[in-house]
Amino acid sequence: MSIKQLLINSLKPLFIITFTILLIVGIFQTKLAPVFHTTQSISTDFSVTGEGIVAVAPDQAEISLGIIINDTSVKSAQTKANSQIETVKASLKTLGIKNDDIKTISYNINPNYDYTSTNRAIKDYTVNITLNIKVTELNKVGDVIDAGTAGGLNTINNLQFSLKDRQKALDQARELAVENAKRQAEITSKTAGISLGKIIYYSEYEQGSDSYLHSYEADTIKQGIGGSEPAVAQTDINPGSGEIKLSVTLTYKTL
């Protein structure tokens, strides 16, 4: 064997050992080395809001009429007040108001004190009765008020107009709002170069109301008991009109 061959044979095991050590170190370092990832958040949602508006005219009303009676005797005050209430109820029924549409919503009895006296004596009592009357024929609203005042009622708390079938008008506003939102989504996405998928979220918010409140103070009618005349020959009430507003938000998945 030549000297050259002898050197090669003697160095071969050393080379193998060195290579193995380097390989093990490389694997070990690779496992321990931290790995960095670069991430980027990309929105995949597209939202639009549409509005639907429906003009509405009220088709029913609720009226709160009442009577206030002062008397030195609780029994006497109750008797007078109850008598006036029954008279008014009878008049309302002649106008076609159903008994179920006439409700007593408050009945109060309160003592009134003489604060000028040292012992704070009771000087008289106040009986306050309030009726809530539903009127389904709006042309009779003025007649109902006149019947109440003519029968001795001396307070008008409020007059509220509303819709019998409010849900129908609300559904119409919803349909218009969704159509408006979809049209906006189509135009905006086309302009911006966005491809829209299916709707993944829906929400709605009602902005308006169809109810209108008319308040009348007690001093706008003649005060008194037992057939006092109303302040005018005939009460004229205009229910007016209003609108229901509904906003909807549609959220699309972008492609």
Image (tube, helix red, strand yellow):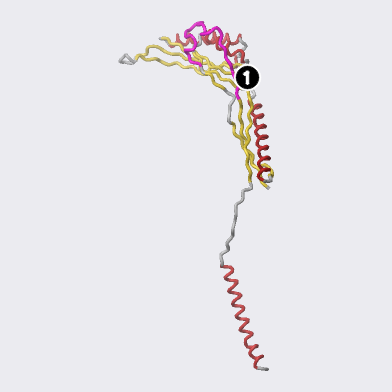
Pointer 1: residues within 10 angstroms few (<14), some, or many (20+)?
some
Q: How many marks?
A: 1
Against 171, is 253 above or below?
below
- In magenta segment, residue 234: yes
Residue 229's x, y, as percent?
Answer: 51, 6
Q: Is residue 81 left or right of residue 162?
A: left
- In magenta segment, residue 161: no
Q: Residue drawn 63% across and 41% down?
A: 47
Image quarter for residue 166?
Answer: top right
Residue 83's x, y, as percent?
Answer: 51, 8
Label 1 is placed on what type of residue? Asp
Q: Residue furthest front?
A: 191
| Secondary structure at numbered mark 1 | loop
Residue 122's x, y, as percent?
Answer: 37, 13
Q: Which residues are magenta?
A: 216-242
The N terminus appears in which quarter of the rendering? bottom right
Image quarter for residue 101?
Answer: top right
Against 78, is 17 above or below?
below
Q: Which SS type dominates the magenta stretch?
A: loop
Q: What residue would you read off at disc 1?
A: 59
Q: Residue drawn 61% across and 19% down?
A: 60
Q: Residue drawn 40% across and 15% down?
A: 111
